[in-house]
Image (spheres, rainbow, N blue to C red):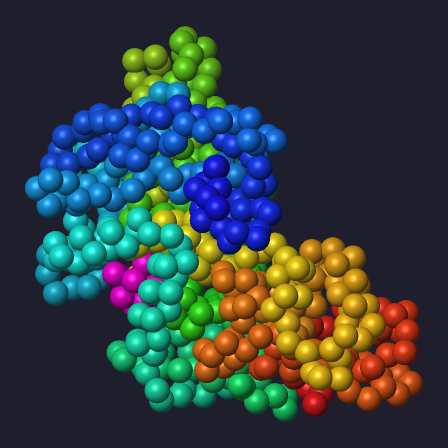
Amino acid sequence: WACSVCEFNNLEGVAHCSLCLTPRDTYLIEANDSVTTFRHGQVSLQPPLVPRPVMNTLFYLHSVLPEDLNPRQRSARMRRQWTRAIDADGAVTWACHFTNAPCSTSSHVVQVLKPTSDDSSSVELSWLPLHALAGQDMTVLGETLPTTTWTYLVELAALPFSVKFAWFLHQAASLVLPQNIKVKCSRDRLLPDAVDTLLGLDGPMRCSSLRFEFQGEVGRDAGGLQREWYMCAAEAFLACGLFAVANRDDNSYFINVDATHALQSSSLAHLQVSEAFRAAGRFVGRALLDGQMLTCPLNPILFKVLLGTPLTLDDVESLDRSVYKSLVYLLTHEDVDALTLTFSVSEPMPSSGHYSIVDLIPNGQDIAVTDANKRDYVDRMVRYLLFDRVQTELLALVQGVYDIIPRELLLPFDHKELELLLCGLTDIDVVDWETNTTLSSDLIGTSLVHWFWDIVRAMSQVDRAKLLQYTTGCSRVPVQGFKGLTSYDGKISRFALRGVAYFAGAYPRVHTCFNRIDLPRYPTKVLLEDAIKTLLLSNATGFTIE
């Protein structure tokens, strides 16, 4: 079934949308707005490419308006805003299907400008107005693709996510080289070791299979260590100061505007900020290539930039809802002179506790915002918030991702699908978990299995995630659900419970490489519950116990 809010195609037995958690019985009421297309410097309005069907809302228990959506629903709905199409002349065009801001503003794309000389240091990231582009057949890397390739990718983009995901897995598997690279890392130096490894991958070796070994630990990597390395490295990248929480509604991370200073007091102090972000980009690329789910809630703007999706005032909402509302207020009200605004912005610098005044135009501090120039002010604020202040870091991040992943592989996905591809499902469905669990013969039909699932159902999402982390090496669920759990070789390896002999003081033993728990055959539910609680109170990382 298709979610009414974000139009994501969900499995038939799922009660809530996997992308935005909207209940199945909810219907979004909105008008069939005209579609704005951009081609060869011209802007035109057309009827909807695919009109939303007129549906009898009596069949739905709940109906909602766009303004009533929660932050997660609003973010997911934005995946429908922009789509690529091939026009009658065979040209690639962007089509805008709706806008949230009551006053339309300009649309821009972020694109790499190729150097005019052999000096690679002259590569820049540019903020380009969509309506002024001569052609829209360029990727975010500033490279064109053949018309036949674009036609295929645009057709693929219109298919359900499950089809695109299967295509991506096939393509990614063909990229991985058979030879293994053994990576030795210390938990005390996990982030600098990870960065050195990522930046040290050259040429074809960037797609070699990676196998990990933690110093001083007995674990051997058959998949579990790799998953744990990705989880720990993701947490370290988010904690080192390169990124900062930008939106408290969804706790998503955007590039830290003070990242250069933050880096100096981190374990990556020996690196330039561009090197650190290139390593972060390669980390994201490797995670996509290896099919690893990351606890890495990046802001939607970063995913849009990676895909080359147009950016507008609407995107400011995902960064800072208060600032978004303020900019909309300026556009919808008169006499803005009374607000005494100027073409400048005060940027907080957390490291120093002070504010930095940045001019949006030359001498901006001395130029007042008026009714006559407020649209220009809003456009420049959008550019500053989404691009100017993080331009260098964005370029390095984009380059890092595409050092690993070919440009064509991500183009069929929208930004929320890319997030799903990288981060997996955050909501742990116990019914799906139980359905896709295999049991040893001695556990089939026993009370012990019923007790286990009763205990899991009673857990909070946080404790379920921790239990999943213990048993699989990752706290996220694959995009296919629990039926998509794999072992080190990429083959399906479903969650498993195996019965073992019970003795006083026995605890469950986990095998993360095989997604398995060896479960002592406890005589009572209380003993099983106590054992699982003790397990959750201990450290979920490390491979020091056989």
Residue 6: horizontal and vertical position, in percent? Answer: 45, 41
Q: Quadrant of the C terminus?
A: bottom right
Residue 315: horizontal and vertical position, in percent? Answer: 41, 37
Q: Quadrant of residue 44?
A: top left
Camera-nearest residue between 80 and 203: 80
Q: Is residue 137 above or below residue 279?
A: above
Q: Is residue 131 above or below residue 403?
A: above
Q: Is residue 154 visible?
A: yes
Q: Is residue 385 visible?
A: no
Q: Is residue 402 magenta?
A: yes
* Dominant secondary-structure state across the stretch colored magenta: helix
| Residue at the spot 61% in from the left edge and 88% down from the top edge | 219
Residue 434: horizontal and vertical position, in percent? Answer: 67, 66
Camera-nearest residue between 471 and 252: 471
| Residue at the spot 63% in from the left edge and 57% down from the top edge | 429
Q: Over which residues does the magenta segment extend?
A: 401-410
Q: Is residue 30 above or below residue 522?
A: above
Say whether residue 5 is left or right of residue 152: right
Camera-nearest residue between 243 and 312: 312
Q: Quadrant of residue 388?
A: top left
Q: Quadrant of residue 101?
A: top left
| Residue at the spot 45% in from the left edge and 88% down from the top edge | 182
| Residue at the spot 27% in from the left edge and 80% down from the top edge | 204
